[in-house]
Amino acid sequence: MRVACKIEECNIQGDDEPTIDPDRPGVCAICSRCGDEALAYGTGEKSIRRALMSLREECSRGEDNFYVAEEDGAESRMPDPVVKPWWQK
């Protein structure tokens, strides 16, 4: 199932090592179905994709969803795409 997720910028607590900044910028992806959250360092497109992939890998319900970033004004639950047979266009 295709599930839209809310993306928020956040600060992620780093390790206790002195070389790592204690608060690093990151993104948080929040599942619109169950509220699960996944974090990723960075605020770019790759970081958002990583957070969405983490949701897929760590789903608390054991579902195998395809997570996408929710766009402004988009519904939180998007229907599965309709796949037509190859002979129909």
Image (tube, rainbow, N blue to C red):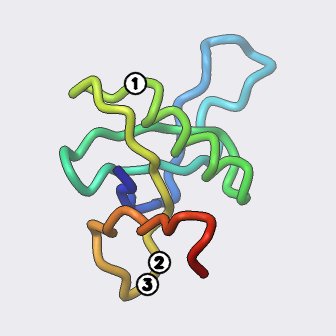
Q: Secondary structure at mark 1?
A: loop
Instruction: Give the image location of residue 34, x and y in percent.
Output: 19, 44
Q: Do the CB atoms of the residues marked 2 and 1 lie less than 8 Å apart?
A: no
Instruction: Tell me which label, 2 or 1, sits earlier in the chain.
Output: 1
Instruction: Give the image location of residue 83, x and y in percent.
Output: 48, 64
Q: Judge the density around disc 1: few (<14), some (14-19), many (≥20) Cα neighbours within 10 Å.
A: some
Q: Amino acid at mark 1?
A: Glu
Q: Is residue 83 left or right of residue 48?
A: left
User: In 3D space, how far apart are the residues under numbered discs 2 and 1 (Cα atoms)?
Assistant: 23 Å
Q: Amino acid at mark 3?
A: Asp
Residue located 53% across and 30% down the image: 13
Q: Judge the density around disc 2: few (<14), some (14-19), many (≥20) Cα neighbours within 10 Å.
A: few
User: In 3D space, how far apart are the residues under numbered discs 2 and 3 (Cα atoms)?
Assistant: 4 Å
Q: Secondary structure at mark 2?
A: loop
Which disc is residue 58 wearing? 1
Which residue in the protein does label 3 denote?
72
Q: Judge the density around disc 3: few (<14), some (14-19), many (≥20) Cα neighbours within 10 Å.
A: few
Which residue in the protein does label 2 denote?
71
